[in-house]
Structures are given as C-alpha cells and as structure tokens.
Image (cartoon, rainbow, N blue to C red):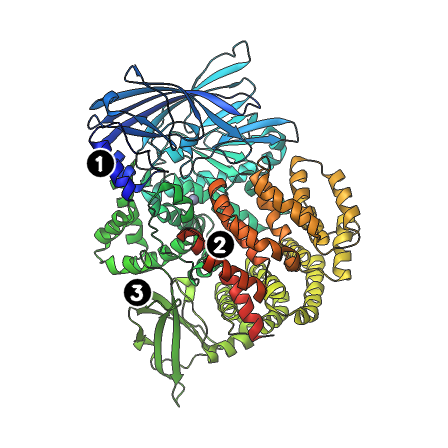
Amino acid sequence: MRLLIMFLALSTAGNLLAAPPPDGIPRELARQRAAQLSDIHYHLRFALTPHAPSTSAHEDLQFRAKSATDVLLDFREGALTNLTVNGVVIPAKIENGHIELPASAIRAGQNSVAIDFTAPVATAGKAITRFEDKDDNTEYLYTLFVPMDAEMAFPCFDQPDLKARFHLELAAPESWTVISNTPIESQSPADTSGQRLTTFSETRPISTYLFAFAAGPFRKVHETSGLPGLYVRQSQFKKAEAEAPEVQQVTAQGIDYLSKFFAQPFPFPKYDLVLIPGFAYGGMEHAGATFLREESVLFRTAPTHSDHLNRDILLLHELTHQWFGDFTTMLWFDDLWLKEGFAQYMAYQALAALQPDENIWKRFYLSIKPAAYGIDSTKGTTPIYQNIENLKDAKSAYGAIVYSKAPGVIKQLAFVLGEEQFRDGLRLYLQEHAYSNAEWSDLVHAFESVSGKPLQNWAAMWIRHRGMPQVDVAWSCDAQNRIDHFTLTQRDVLDEGGVWPIATQVLLAYPSGAPLRLRAQLDAQSADLPEALAKSCPEYVFLNDQDYAYGRFLLDNRSRKAVFDHLGEIPGTFDRALLWGSLWDSVREADLAPRDFLELALRLLPNELDEELAQALIGHVTTGLHRYVSDATRAQIAPKFETLASDRMLHSDQQDFRIIWFRALRAIAESPQGRAQLKDILAGKLAVPGVVLRPLDRWTMLTALIALNDPDSGALLAGEQKRDPSGDGQKYAYMAQAARPDAATKQKYFNDYLHDPSRPEDWIAQSLGAFNYWNQSQLTLPYLKPALEALPQVKRERKIFFLLGWLNAFIDGQQSLAAQAQVRDFLSTAPLDKDLQLKILEVSDELDRTVRIRQRYP
Ligand SMILES: [Zn+2]
C-alpha cells in the first residue's frame, strides 16, 4: 500500500517512473485510470495458427486522456515487438505485467497506440486455451478472461469499469469457424497459406473480461431463424443435434421472459452459445456469445428430468448475465455477488415462470441453500460484499458466498419488498446504468426509491456482515389445547454478536386439516409472535416455511419427535424437503445421531416420489455412511441400502428413479454382492431397465471397483479402455486409475498434479475425487500437508474454481483426528495470506464436524 502511494505520487508528477509498476491491478490504480481515461476502442487482429504455442497480433488502441500523464497498460506473459504512441516509437518493455506509456508521449484528449505483440496459447494455464480433440485430431482455440486474464491475450486496461468497444479481426485456417461477441462483418478469401481473415462488427461498450472469441472446426447445430445459434465441435455434432432444439427453445423463451421482466430488450446484437469441452466453468457469459461447458449440455451420463432442469438453470443463469453483468456491470470485483447472485436468483425465477408445473423454489432450496449454509456456518466465511484490494485476488471472491448465499439473501429481499417492487427496483437499476457500471449501493438505492422502505440496516447485516443466524422457537399450549406462548429467538451461528433483520413465514402443522402459515418479523434477539397465540395447538412448528428466510432453522424437540413419526405422511414435497433438510442440519450439528437419520431414510426413501428430494437424501445417506458413522455401523447399514438401491434400480416404475438408484448403488456398493452387480452391468449381463448407460456411467462404476480393490478391476479397466478410446474415454481412464489403492499411484498422480504443465486442468479436476476416494484416507493422508502447501501455486496457476475443488478433495478424503490435527497445525504455522486461511477454515469445517460427530456417536 505504501509503495503504491509513492508510485502514484511520482506518476502524477509526470516523471519517468522510478518505482516499478505494481503487481496486478491495485484498486487505487483502477480508480485513477477510470478517472483519467475514457472512450476506449480496441482494434485487434490475431493470427491463429494450428499447433502454434503463441499467436502474433496487432492492436490499435484509442482512448481519451484527461491530461498528459503516464498511462499503464496491462499485459503479462506475452512479448512486445513494436510499440508506437501517437506516432512516436517508444521502447517496448513489459515490466511486472504492465507497459508504461510515458507522460511525454501522451496527450490530453485523443490518443492512439499501435502495438505488435505475441500472446501465449496452451492447453492449460493461459488466457487462450487450446483443446485437442483426440476423436478426430482437430484443435480448437478459445479465450477465457475472467477475472483479469484479458491482459494475458492483449495489452489492455483490464478492469471492469473501463468498458470499451472492440473491433476484432481473426486470421485463421479457412476450414475453421470463428465466433465472437458480434456478428461477422466480412470475410476475405483464403490467402496462399490457407488463412482467411474474418472481421467482426464493433461491439457495444463491454468490459475486457466479457470480450471473447473461439475458433476451430466448430459446426452450427440446428440453425433456425429466431433461435440463438449453437456451436459444437464437429466430432460431437450428432449428439448435439439431439439436444439443440430444447437448449435453443429454453434460451429463446428466457430471452422473451427476461426482456419483459427487466423492461429492457436483449442488449446485444446477437446471442450465440458455444459448447467448449472441458471448459473450466459451467458457463461464461461473454456479451452476445456465452461459452458453455460441453459436458453440462451434452450429458455424459444417462440424464434424469432433474438433470434437464439443472441445464435449464445454467442456460438461464448465463442468459440473465447479458443484462445483469454485461449490460450493467459491477464497478469492481468486490461486487461480484451483484451479477452472480442475481443471475442465480433470476434463473430460478425465470424457470418458475417458464415451467409453472415444476416446484422450482423447492429446487432452489435443495440446490442452492446447502452450499450457502455450508460455508456460512464456518469460520472461513466472508460477507457477501468482499473487499478486494487488487484484481489479482479477485479469484478469491468466487465461491458459495456469491453463488449460493447471495441468491438466498436476494430471495429474502424479494419477500421483504414484495414481487412488484422487487421487479421495479431491478428495472430502475438497469435503466440508470445502461452499458455502464454500478455498485451494490446503487441497487439498494433503486430498491429504496421504488419501495419507500429504508434498507440500510438490512443491507448492513445481510451484505456487509458475515455469518448467519440460527432461529429457534419456544412454544407451549394451554389446557384448552391452544397456543399460549410463542417466542422466536436468534443467535449468531459464529457467536460474533450479529443480529439480523429476519422476515419469515412460520408453519403450524396439524395432524388433519390445513396448516397455518404466519408471517413473522424478527429484528431483535427475540420477539413474540402474537398472531400465533390462541391458535390450536399444532403437531409441529417449522420456522422457515417456503424457505423465504436465510439461516439455520432446527426443529424444537417436540416438533422433531412429531416429524420423525410423520415425515412420510406429509403431503407437500417442499415441506418434506425443508424438514429433511432441518433434520440433516441437526446431524451436522452433532445434535442427532447419524444412525437415526440413516434409519429414517431407509424407512422412508422407498416411498419418496420426488426425484430431486430422493436424490438429495441419497447424497446425505452416502455422506452419512462414508463419513459420519463408525465402520461397525456402516457394516450393519450399508448392505441394507445396497439392497434397497438394487431393488429400486431394477423395479421402480419410473425411469428417473431407476437412474438415481443406479447412481446410488454405484456410490454405496462395497460388499461382494454389490460389486458383482456393478460388474454384471459393465459386462452387459444386467441392465437398468429402459436406460442406456453413457460412457461416464460406466467409467464411474469402474472407478468405484478400482477404489474398492475389486480383483477383477484390472481386467475391466483394460476392457473399458479398449471399448472407449475416445478423447473423453482417455480422460475418464485417467480419473479411474487415480483411485488405485496403492502408494505408487498416489505418488505418480500427485506429482502430475503439480509438475506436469501439459496435463489439461480438466483431467486433474476430474480425478481429484478418485484420488481421495472415501475408503483411502490412510493412503492419501501423507498428501494432505503437501496439498495444503501447494495452495499458493494452485491459486496462482489455476482457473477460478479449481482451488476449492482441490481443497475439498484432499480434506474431505479424511475423517480422522490425526488429519484434523495436521490441518490445524498447518493453519497455525504456515505463512498464508488471509484468503487462503479463510478457504482452509471453510473447507476443514466439514472435517471438524466429522470428527465431532464420530466422537459424539461412536
Ligand atoms: Zn454467473
């Protein structure tokens, strides 16, 4: 911080810089540049050559400067060959990821800079990624810049509030298709070397992280006027044809719905979807050209109805960003939640409108809330608003807080404001910040001005304060069987003294007759609910009916007992989901024996008719068996679940259930009989009726057999490799073999993870769970500390979500006191930045809980 101030003082004086430029993009530099620069245009030409380790490129950059001072351009890992500022050649030098344009060359007013440079292209770790398609020996190039990798591809002002117009030209082989943010303006004939130049029309003002291109022998699928374009690599064309109509239809309906909801037409000249294999995220919302992970759209496993709805959510999430993120963009990445929270929330809201027969808010609860509460009850949590001093640390902001807590808190806000005022606030916010940037305080201001409700206190606790409340109830009934006492209290889950303004709906349930649903407001530590008094004595009480509120809502003893006895008879799916969730929270609080939960699940799961809830419960059962109960208890209960899974897989009358129980069997099977069934399925001797298994279904079965050290697994692996030699097959074989229960394998893989730069990041991410298989904690414990020690490297070199995947895999692979001691020791002795400390605290909370649960219920 001090160094930076000195540097800025010098630079305002217009001197040649004595101090080196700063690392990354400090907030202060960003502020200064935003005040100084405007009207930015990038005219870029890249030459894309097959197999080349770099691209050579030319850039014409124009901008207006307020005064003639030094200007820093961001550019790292590339090389400069020529640099001209306002017609004057200046020494081309990159220092600390920046190019200095000296004050002597800059004019107040219009400036133009010409740059020749090269930028790296690689299979991993660069802004321009090469994917090699082993199915037909072709290659594809694509960009992924968020949060600050545009500067790895071209010199730029790589901060979200310096929006610019981009004019892109791509020279690429004639057989390649090229896609970018805007429509193609013109295309030249191929030259003698077979390269063809494509020019795209100029973009609207967009942030650097939203600029993108992709190139390769992509094919356009199911081209239909009025529907968004869908591109896929040529080897997957047939598979994509089957999925395209649904994908395009949902997107088109989403565009229609969101345009009306936001009262703002689609803000860019066209919208394409590009499927990228092994893409590091589910999707990335480049303005006018969303890139989607191919695996999230073309299912690698036999899909259920629920998988289709999850895909719709992904499509609608990225689509919402075209307004919320691309059209109106956060000023800085500390407001990341603004775009992610709203994209997530609006995806559900849009799907609820498009599919009114689905219980989308139950889906929201089951898919979003566990991760939110999961992080928010740990010492590693952060407020939704996360201060980011330097853009190079922006990766840290990505995680459950912005993707899960923020949409959960937005749902609470919509409940507080009411639907109409919520919608009008969003409309006002977008209207006031069209093609521009805004902060969360602008949004709060918009909501306040349409609703007339003061929200400062609300925002202070929900946006700026970390953690969450636990809400408890004390209630009793009188001799006439009427409620005579009903008090809500809240406590800060982290014991940090927080008191939140909570709006909720309380459910009073009766053995016969409709339940009562009462609105309640809890702004203090404790409050009575007068509306409940004199009501008939309920069978049980639940404090977060319909999941409007955000927090931990455990059942009081009387209610818990009633729920245990009657959960199977409760007709509402959403109600059942919430009550199961509350019981699971009690297990995780070491307040309910995991065995009791498992036995309840064993009793009720066979009759659970909601696919998504059944899937969530199977997930809890798997965690319970593999982490929370003792080996002896698992030995008693796991075979019962195996039998149940096998029976439902074969005999359930609904295909979706046969699929989810097949997945359950694969996750749970460990007995010789269970393994024999998996082997029979692999050999084709046993089938899941009516279901055609897909390659990843098979590879995952094989991974389990390898991890369980099944004597036939070696032969089965060889057979599967022969059967599926595709590019995907090679990746999955890499995954499966990581599960081998021997020390040499672990050593080889761990070395690969950290020291083989040619290994695609996606292969590593895919194999981490197999490496740390639940039954191999003794073998993997020696890698726990090295994995923690590697965190700074992982953070530096890998894409955004990799770090959490890494930490989760290595820490969740452990259940013991010894592992817990290692993590704690590392936390207290290693010199770690604050962000990494928080991440470890976040992830190791699950290990702490596991140890606590196993001690309490041995
Ligand atoms: Zn997003």
Question: Residues under labels 2 and 1: Cα distance?
Answer: 62 Å
Identify the residue under disc 1: 9
Residue 401 appears in the rendering: yes
Q: Which mark is residue 501?
A: 3
The percent coordinates of residue 771 (x first, y second) are 63, 51
Amino acid type at circle 3 is Pro
Q: CA distance from mark 1 to mark 3?
A: 44 Å
In this picture, is 662 found above or below 561? above
Some atom of ligand 1 lies within 8 Å of the CB belonging to the residue at label 2: no
Which comes sooner in the sequence, label 2 or label 1? 1
- Locate ligand 1 by image quadrant: top left
Say left or right for 858 vs 710. left
N-terminal of the pair, mark 2 or mark 3, is 2
Please name which of the two marks, 2 or 3, marks the residue nearer to the observer. 3
Above-or-below relation of 183 to 335: above
Q: Position of residue 442 (x, y in %)?
A: 25, 47
Disc assigned to residue 357: 2
Queried on whether the Cβ of the residue with tag 1 lies below 8 angstroms from ligand 1, the answer reads no
Q: Earlier in the sequence, mark 1 or mark 3?
A: 1
Q: Is residue 46 visible?
A: no
Give the CA separation, mark 2 to mark 3: 32 Å
> Crowding near pointer 1: few (<14 within 10 Å), some, many (20+)?
few
Give SS at disc 2. loop
Image quadrant holding the N terminus, namely: top left
